[in-house]
Image (cartoon, grey):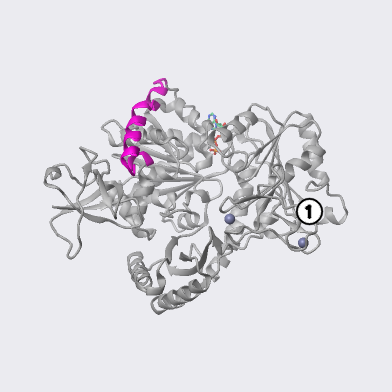
Amino acid sequence: MFADIILPIPFDSFTYLIPPALEDRVMRGCRVVVPLGKNKIYTGVVLRTHNNAPAGVEMKAIIEVLDNTPVVNEPQFAFWQWVANYYLCPLGDVMKAALPGAMKPKDEKALRESSRKRRSSTIDSLYSNDVATLSALSPPQQKAFDEIGTSFLTKNVTLLHGVTSSGKTEIYIHLIDKYLSQGKQVLYLLPEIALTTQITDRLRRFFGDRMGVYHSKFTDAQRLDVYKRQASPTPYQLILGVRSSVFLPFQNLGLVIVDEEHEQSYKQQEPAPRYHARNAAIMLAHMFKAKTLLGTATPSFEVYHLAKKERYGYVRLTQRFRDMQLPTIEVVDTKEAKRKRLMKGLFSPRLIEVMKTALEKKEQIILFQNRRGFSSFIECKTCGWVPHCPHCDVTLTLHKKTSTLTCHYCGYTTRIPERCPACEENKFTDVGTGTEKVEEQMAKLFEGATTLRMDLDTATTRTQYEQIISDFAEHKADILIGTQMVTKGLDFDNVSVVGILDADTMLNLPDFRSYERTFQTLSQVAGRAGRNNTSGHVILQTRSADSDIIRQITQADYWQMFCTQMTERQLFHYPPFRRLIYVYLRHRDDQLLDHLANDMADRLRAVFGERVLGPDRPPVARIHSLFIRKIMLKIELEASTEKVRQNLIAIQQQMLALPVAKNLNIYYDVDPL
Ligand code: ADP
Ligand code: ZN
Ligand code: ZN
């Protein structure tokens, strides 16, 4: 007897001998311990057992079986296979992402460690059974709720397009209640950063210990507990979780809610599988014949397009709860203000005035700046030398408080040099603006005002992040400065002013999605103002005050923005009209990589013709000392994904078989964001 085992390395599976003593215990879905290579030991999952001895290979035997019953069920296997096929990666990579760390210990020490941890975890005992009764939906909310029900009669996926603070979460709560009372399981997905204590507590009040939370910042033991509970006869009925919770075992899934559907962070960038949790969740729901509700104030084009084509159902909610007004967005032309020398650093006179008034009224303020650190980089005043990361193709970001320069790709950090290594002079200027600079300038402009900063530097852990949120909610600071982190579904009562310091850096990014993104991000950040009782006021500073996109943002005119952008997308064959696949090649040797990338592009052209573009150097063409090339494929939506996959894998195998291609790394990003 033989078994094909999935291991947590980038291959589909490896075949092992089943020793007679273990024959009864090696079952599909159970974990086993196996040797690999000379002296490595791995934990893997049995994919299948069979009698076909592979020819001409010396086979090793399974050492140990860890489970008496399968820990991966049939729906999971089907889902893993779909992820591997669609996102063009080996099953091993999918398994690595799908199982909590504690389930795939590498060696015996780790095995013992993980069973010790399992015993000491306590998550289940934390929650009581007390549950609150659901609140009275408002008439527009009730209408939307009913429309969702009707839509689900004919559509598997429905988009709930509701302005910020219209009560989407309230509607989800009612829907969850409905499905739970039918004995169905519900998965409620949120972007990583939006899964805060705020939302957890709000749901906990209604669903008590029927709800499990699954978060990547939880300890291994906590995640293992949730996983095991879901595989047990008494699983949580509701899972509130981040993207990786699509990999949990479900038994009776009836509904998936994907909140903030447009959020980019649903896409896993690194490492493989580079899956999109929203799309994967739709597939997961499909496998269970369950329904999917996608909620957002600013739909992604992909989803809105399908809703307009009536592939998805569509429910609109245009009123804020209690008829609160959407905040007014006032545009301040910084080009004009600069010409008249009225700017105080990054602040226009109008923004300063509005902030002062709010501070006098003891109202709070959020300032949005899309870049962390102090400035983008420093430059030698004499010769123009700019410090770069020695391992990546990027400039180092200045962090003034710590007097360091940091690479935001690999983390390389160095002190600011005393003298320019090129010309030996010692005068530097800084270029660009980050949150740290905003904080410094503000301290001078608004003496006495207290500030908090929220970005990847100050909120490195979940605890720090939660602390900043709760401190701001308790009004321990007047002003919150932050990157995109402050845009994610936060609900502060007392914020009356939102200041967007510079809309242009986002608009000018060289990306076909930059307008869509800017619209989404700025609408979301604006939506933080005036959520409860306070009326909101947003100041948007820009150098392109009279552009169409700025007008569309201020008038919350999603439709106009969508139509304008879609014309361009269609013209240049971009999503949602085509499916994009990026093929990446990585190698230490830049010249050899050039040769290999051209070779691969030629082979791709022979099959895919003009759908192939490149190879190109991506904007960051070297990371961690590996050079990178990108080949782009634009595939018609009607094309068979399976056929595309087979062609790509065949060409990849030809490439990797070339003697010069030793150490070449090829990977894919399907539907890149
Ligand atoms: P969204 O998810 O659309 O941003 P929320 O569901 O968070 O909106 O609602 C915004 C605010 O209004 C929240 O503080 C919420 O508690 C309150 N709210 C919304 N609908 C109701 C309702 N039907 N009854 C009581 N409070 C509600
Ligand atoms: Zn110099
Ligand atoms: Zn680097």
Residue under numbered circle 1: 333
Element type where label 1 sits in the image: strand
Q: Quadrant of residue 247?
A: top left
Q: Nearer the viewer, residue 26 or 417?
A: 417
Magenta stretch in the rendered image: 101-130
Q: Residues within 10 Å of mark 1 (few under 14, many from 20)?
A: some
Q: x, y percentage for residue 282? A: 39, 50
> Looking at the image, in which quadrant does ligand 2 appear?
bottom right
Give the residue displayed 49% in from the left and 34% down from the top: 170
Q: Locate residue 556 relative to residue 9 in the image: left or right.
A: right
Write the residue at 20% across / 62% down.
57
Question: What main secondary structure does the magenta stretch of the protein show?
Answer: helix
Relative to 586, residue 463 above or below: above
Q: Is residue 103 magenta?
A: yes
321 sits to left or right of 498: left
Of 291 and 258, which appears nearest the observer?
258
Vertical arrangement, residue 198 with respect to residue 576, above or below: above
Residue 430 drawn at (x, y percent): 75, 54
Q: Quadrant of residue 206?
A: top left
Residue 292 x %, y %: 40, 46
Q: What amino acid type should be assigned to the residue bearing mark 1?
A: Asp
Relative to the observer, which residue lies in front, 67 or 229?
67
Pick the residue in front: 423 or 316.
423
